[in-house]
Image (tube, helix red, strand yellow):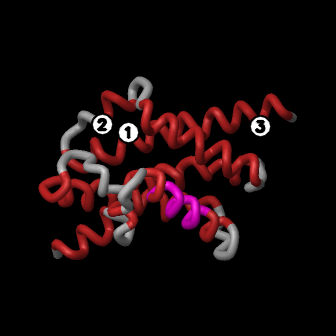
Amino acid sequence: MRALIILLSTGCYVGYTPRAPGTAGSVLGLGLAWALTGPLGLSLPYYLLVTAALFLLGVWVSGRAEPLFGHDGPEIVIDEIGGVLIVFLIVFSGMPLDLFTVVAGFVLFRVLDIWKPFPCDLTQRLPGGLGVMMDDAVAAVYTYLLLLLTGWLLL
């Protein structure tokens, strides 16, 4: 069971990247978001189902990984993967998954995840895996809203 917790919490060991493991986890999340919306062509309900399932799995897995890595340890990247899936719900709002959207979404998410504006900072203090996952979920929602606003202003 320990090996499975490590495998999942580190995003198939991406969390062991020596520099910027959160960014590496976000890249993995970006690849997953692309696969789900592109080649697999999931509709919104199925994409939401996968995102919710990953969030719940992330709460459980990261809670079990905390004794190994500490609370929201850098090796735990399942939260970044889930956060990126939330960000790229944007494609279902009609915004294209073009280079601008990908780069802007990725950069904004990383900045907000690292900066942790209110209430991200508070949600990270929640106990166990919920705290690990929630700060990234809030940063992802902020990113999503900023992308929507940007798209609206550019149209």
Q: Categorize mark 2 by other alpha carbons within 10 Å: few (<14), some (14-19), many (20+).
A: many
Q: Residue at x 44, y 26 (%)?
A: 117
Lower position in the chain sequence, tag 2 or tag 1: 2
Against 121, is 85 above or below? Answer: below
Secondary structure beneath label 1: helix
Residue occupying the far right of the picture: 155
What residue does disc 3 label? 151
Name the kind of residue labelled 3 in the image: Gly
In contact (CB < 8 Å): disc 2 and disc 3:
no
User: Main structural element of the magenta stretch: helix, strand or loop?
Assistant: helix
Q: Quadrant of the N terminus?
A: bottom left
Against 151, is 44 above or below? Answer: below
In contact (CB < 8 Å): disc 2 and disc 1:
yes
Q: Nearer the viewer, residue 135 or 68?
A: 68
Name the kind of residue labelled 2 in the image: Gln
- On the question of residue 96 being in view, the answer is yes
Q: Residue at x 71, y 47 (%)?
A: 101
Mark number displayed over residue 41: none
Against 150, is 53 above or below? Answer: below
Secondary structure beneath label 3: helix
Name the kind of residue labelled 1 in the image: Asp
Residue occupying the far front of the picture: 18
Q: Position of residue 141 (x, y in %)?
A: 53, 39
Distance between the alpha carbons at the discs numbered 2 and 1: 5 Å
What residue does disc 1 label? 135
Count of picture labels:
3
Secondary structure beneath label 2: loop
Q: Which residues are magenta?
A: 25-33
Distance between the alpha carbons at the discs numbered 2 and 3: 29 Å
What residue does disc 2 label? 124
Q: Nearer the viewer, residue 125 or 51?
A: 125
